[in-house]
Image (cartoon, rainbow, N blue to C red):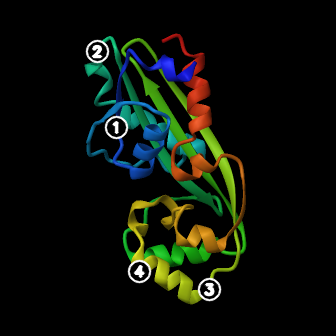
């Protein structure tokens, strides 16, 4: 059913995330990437999925009024929620090192929201995955933060990278959600929509 659902739609993905591009490709969706610069600030009173939902909607706001009848716009946001605060993308490799160090020997939540917009409707969905890190060896952490694209990742890591293979003990929830796009929830939502 899903593979037929978006056939007549011009799918627009407003995201630079390589992981999101790959996941949509793996779902067999033909899409066009929309590049935009968005101020990703949000009210400090927001918590957990309130943050990602706010930002996913914000990312759609400049584009929604320009949608044609057969356009379907996807915007998304992911955070790591740890110690009652949101970890976004680090600004420096040193900040990435410290961020990852704070995640060892405990669990955190990865929260992703997806905003699906047409010129008739808008729906926002969210998913949460619990990730458990083991102790991280200092040399491994140094190697990872110096050699991988940590600055482009919420919480400074990619679960599919070196650090994920050697340090993540287990996850509870969707793996694709930790990559930044909960595919199963997205498919379920699209299937339920009157498109």
Locate residue 165 relative to residue 95 in the image: left or right: right
Q: Quadrant of the N terminus?
A: top right
**Residue at which label 4 appears:** 146
Question: Which one is earlier in the sequence, the residue at label 3 or at label 2?
Answer: 2
Which mark is drawn over residue 68? 2
Quote the CA–CA distance across marks 1 and 4: 29 Å
Q: Position of residue 164 (x, y in %)?
A: 59, 67
Locate residue 95 relative to residue 67 in the image: left or right: right
Report the front residue among 188 and 77: 188
Q: Position of residue 50 (x, y in %)?
A: 56, 40
Question: Which one is earlier in the sequence, the residue at label 1 or at label 3?
Answer: 1
Report the front residue among 78 and 162: 162
Asked where in the image residue 86 lies, by quadrant, the reply is bottom right
Report the front residue among 41 and 135: 135
Q: For the residue carrying disc 2, how many other residues have a C-alpha within 10 Å: few (<14), some (14-19), or many (20+)?
A: few
Q: Position of residue 152 (x, y in %)?
A: 39, 61
Q: Is residue 47 visible?
A: no
SS class, disc 1: loop
Quote the CA–CA distance across marks 2 and 1: 16 Å
């Amino acid at each position: 059913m899903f593979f037929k659902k978006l056939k007549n739609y011009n799918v627009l993905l407003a995201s630079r995330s390589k992981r999101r591009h790959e996941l949509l490709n793996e779902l067999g969706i033909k899409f066009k990437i929309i590049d935009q610069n968005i101020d990703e600030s949000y009210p400090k009173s927001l918590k957990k999925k309130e943050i990602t939902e706010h930002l996913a909607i914000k990312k759609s706001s400049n584009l929604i009024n320009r949608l044609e009848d057969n356009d379907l716009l996807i915007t998304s946001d992911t955070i790591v929620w740890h110690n009652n605060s949101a970890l976004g993308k680090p600004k420096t490799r040193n900040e990435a090192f410290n961020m990852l160090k704070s995640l060892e020997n405990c669990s955190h939540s990865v929260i992703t929201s997806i905003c699906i917009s047409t010129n008739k409707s808008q729906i926002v969905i969210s998913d949460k995955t619990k990730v458990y890190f083991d102790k991280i060896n200092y040399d491994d952490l140094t190697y990872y933060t110096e050699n991988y694209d940590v600055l482009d990742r919420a919480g400074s890591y990619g679960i599919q990278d070196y650090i994920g293979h050697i340090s993540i003990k287990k996850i509870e929830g969707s793996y694709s959600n930790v990559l930044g796009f909960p595919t199963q929830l997205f498919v379920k939502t699209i299937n339920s929509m009157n498109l």
